[in-house]
């Protein structure tokens, strides 16, 4: 492809490989160069070739922004140094006194940012179960400016109805932001369901190789694009050109990675669902899962994240499983090619008191898997032998 790919013309796989990128005009290099520079020479003051200073723009970043925007079917993509930097920029565009209605099954770092950083600055947050539309309606206040949604959620893999929530928000002039990190744009495109903003931690599936930290916000609104670029210019939470290059390299295989993530996760969910040592499996791909019907409509497939409890529910038993796997690595994060295993009660959700955690559905033995793209037999055998360690 000689020219930059037009967004509407091609499918996700073609966009993943080509969108935002054109061969380097000076050398013909097919890969976008890593423009490792802080500034750009001007012929005369103000007479530049499209870039002035790298806090504001960098060509490697611009290529990545075009690529990620195309994958979300968005007019604009704005890249940040991390997922939480993107969330920070969105919320900073609100004003003290504004109210944000947020889901209660939320990424811990987002909750911490809302509670510990923005509440003291006078923004107001409510955390509710957004699967229940009546509860959402009742929680809307005159000063509600934004809904903050996340689906599927962490770690209970719950599914929210993006179309219904966006429609309800529109009735009340509320803007909708969706954290689409767990699904990736390959499985779900929130803007097409009525959302105003989509946020990703590109650290996860978009990068896909556990080798970078990054974030992106995608939107069709020129107004939001301007506001967020202004935040970038003022506060400078930008990714470096090397990370942008790695992210571009990652998205080229997003579609085939996601296919394998989903395929493997589905087989592991079936395996666990029939295992005598396992209690409950949380995966919307299982027909009995409460999110199954909605996820079947809203998503192309059911994703690579799943959680399960042990039949003998205790922290000790969960620890036995965690310390007995050899293909699954014990680590935080998700969305990379390698399979990861984690224990929310002692890792990501350790700061929540036990009673409150259990009430929220996070049992002592709950184990979360980020299913990678390894051979399925190796993954299943690894889990099977680890489960056999449980008495
Ligand atoms: C990891 C994560 C984030 C934060 O992203 P960073 O890149 O780590 O800053 C936000 N939301 C979700 C759902 C995540 O998994």
Image (spheres, rainbow, N blue to C red):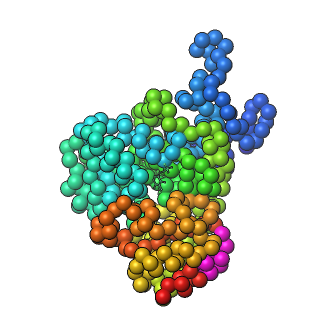
Q: Quadrant of residue 330?
A: bottom right
In x, y percent, where is residue 209? Answer: 63, 56
Relative to 150, residue 123 above or below = above
Q: Residue at x 63, y 73 (%)?
A: 326
Relative to 242, residue 101 above or below = below
In x, y percent, where is residue 127? Answer: 29, 55
In x, y percent, where is residue 288? Answer: 41, 78
Q: Is residue 272 visible in this depiction of the protein?
A: yes
Relative to 47, residue 77 above or below = below
Q: Nearer the viewer, residue 53 or 350?
A: 350
Q: Which residues are magenta?
A: 374-383
Left or right of 208? Residue 200 is: left
Q: State how many labels appear.
A: 0
Q: Quadrant of the N terminus?
A: top right
Q: Residue at x 29, y 66 (%)?
A: 356
Q: Is residue 309 magenta?
A: no
Q: Residue at x 23, y 61 (%)?
A: 134
Q: Residue at x 56, y 56 (%)?
A: 205
Q: Residue furthest top?
A: 44
Q: Quadrant of residue 186?
A: bottom right
Q: Residue furthest right?
A: 27
Most prominent secondary structure in the magenta stretch? helix
Q: Quadrant of residue 91?
A: top left
């Amino acid at each position: 492809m000689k020219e930059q790919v037009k967004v509407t013309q091609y499918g996700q796989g073609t966009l993943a490989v080509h969108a935002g990128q054109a061969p380097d005009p000076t050398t013909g290099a097919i890969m976008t160069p890593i423009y490792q520079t802080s500034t750009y020479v001007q012929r005369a003051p103000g007479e530049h070739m499209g870039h002035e200073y790298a806090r504001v723009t960098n060509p490697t970043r611009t290529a990545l922004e075009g690529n990620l925007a195309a994958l979300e079917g968005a007019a604009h993509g704005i890249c940040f140094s991390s997922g939480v930097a993107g969330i920070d920029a969105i919320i900073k565009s609100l004003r003290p006194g504004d109210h944000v209605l947020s889901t209660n099954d939320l990424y811990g770092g987002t909750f911490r940012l809302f509670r510990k950083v923005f509440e003291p600055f006078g923004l107001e947050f409510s955390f509710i179960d957004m699967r229940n539309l009546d509860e959402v309606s009742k929680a809307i206040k005159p000063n509600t400016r934004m809904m903050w949604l996340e689906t599927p959620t962490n770690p209970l893999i719950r599914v929210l109805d993006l179309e219904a929530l966006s429609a309800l928000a529109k009735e009340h002039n509320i803007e909708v932001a969706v954290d689409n990190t767990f699904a990736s744009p390959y499985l779900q495109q929130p803007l097409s369901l009525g959302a105003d903003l989509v946020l990703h931690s590109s650290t996860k599936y978009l990068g896909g190789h556990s080798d970078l930290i990054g974030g992106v916000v995608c939107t069709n609104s020129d107004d939001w694009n301007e506001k967020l670029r202004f935040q970038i210019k003022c506060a400078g939470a930008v990714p470096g050109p090397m990370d942008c290059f790695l992210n571009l390299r990652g998205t080229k295989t997003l579609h085939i990675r996601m296919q394998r993530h989903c395929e493997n996760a589905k087989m592991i969910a079936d395996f666990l669902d029939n295992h005598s040592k396992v209690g409950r499996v949380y995966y919307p791909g299982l027909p009995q899962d409460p999110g199954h019907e909605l996820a079947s409509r809203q998503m192309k497939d059911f994703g690579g994240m799943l959680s399960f409890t042990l039949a003998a529910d205790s922290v000790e038993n969960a620890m036995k499983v965690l310390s007995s796997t050899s293909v699954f690595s014990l680590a935080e994060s998700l969305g990379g090619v390698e399979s990861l295993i984690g224990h929310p009660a002692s890792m990501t959700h350790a700061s929540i008191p036990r009673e409150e955690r259990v009430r929220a559905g996070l049992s002592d033995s709950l184990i979360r898997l980020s299913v990678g793209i390894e051979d399925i037999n190796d993954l299943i055998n690894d889990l099977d032998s680890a489960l056999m360690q449980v008495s």
